[in-house]
Amino acid sequence: MSELTISDASALSGWRKSSYSGNESGSCVEILDGYLSGVPVRDSKNPHGPALVFTAASWSSFITTFRTGR
């Protein structure tokens, strides 16, 4: 799997909390929809930190694995 890293994720707008993140304070994963190069993912506790950009296929595989509990 190949990822692209965005060094300052705050340079992008439109982040949303993943529906798979819990309601606990500060433990959120945010994703950005509509990014042409893939699916950016960041830690909401560090909005100016890095984001990883996964290919759509890799992200889909991750979500499927997560949903099935494997």
Image (spheres, grey):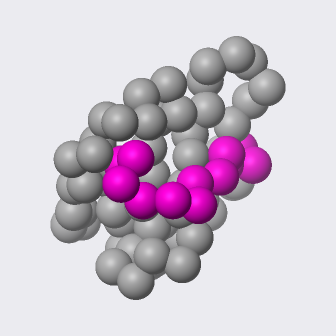
Image position, residue 44 (x, y; %) = 53, 33
Quadrant hosting residue 69 = top right
The residue closer to the viewer here, 65 or 53, is 53
Whether residue 1 is visible to the viewer of this picture, yes or no, is: yes
* Left or right, residue 27 beside residue 50: right
Image position, residue 4 (x, y; %) = 21, 63
Q: Residue furthest top?
A: 25
The residue closer to the viewer here, 49 or 38, is 49
Residue 3 lies, with reference to residue 45, above or below; the image says below
**Number of residue marks:** 0
Quadrant hosting residue 60 = bottom right
Q: Which residues are magenta?
A: 9-20
At 74% from the left and 29% from the top, the residue drawn is: 22
| Quarter of the figure that contains the N terminus | bottom left
Residue 20 lies, with reference to residue 47, above or below; the image says below
Q: Residue furthest right?
A: 23
Image position, residue 58 (x, y; %) = 41, 69
Whether residue 65 is visible to the viewer of this picture, yes or no, is: no
- Is 13 colored magenta in this rendering? yes
Image position, residue 54 (x, y; %) = 36, 65
Residue 47 lies, with reference to residue 53, above or below; the image says above
* Left or right, residue 38 beside residue 66: left
* Left or right, residue 21 beside residue 14: right
At 28% from the left and 45% from the top, the residue drawn is: 8
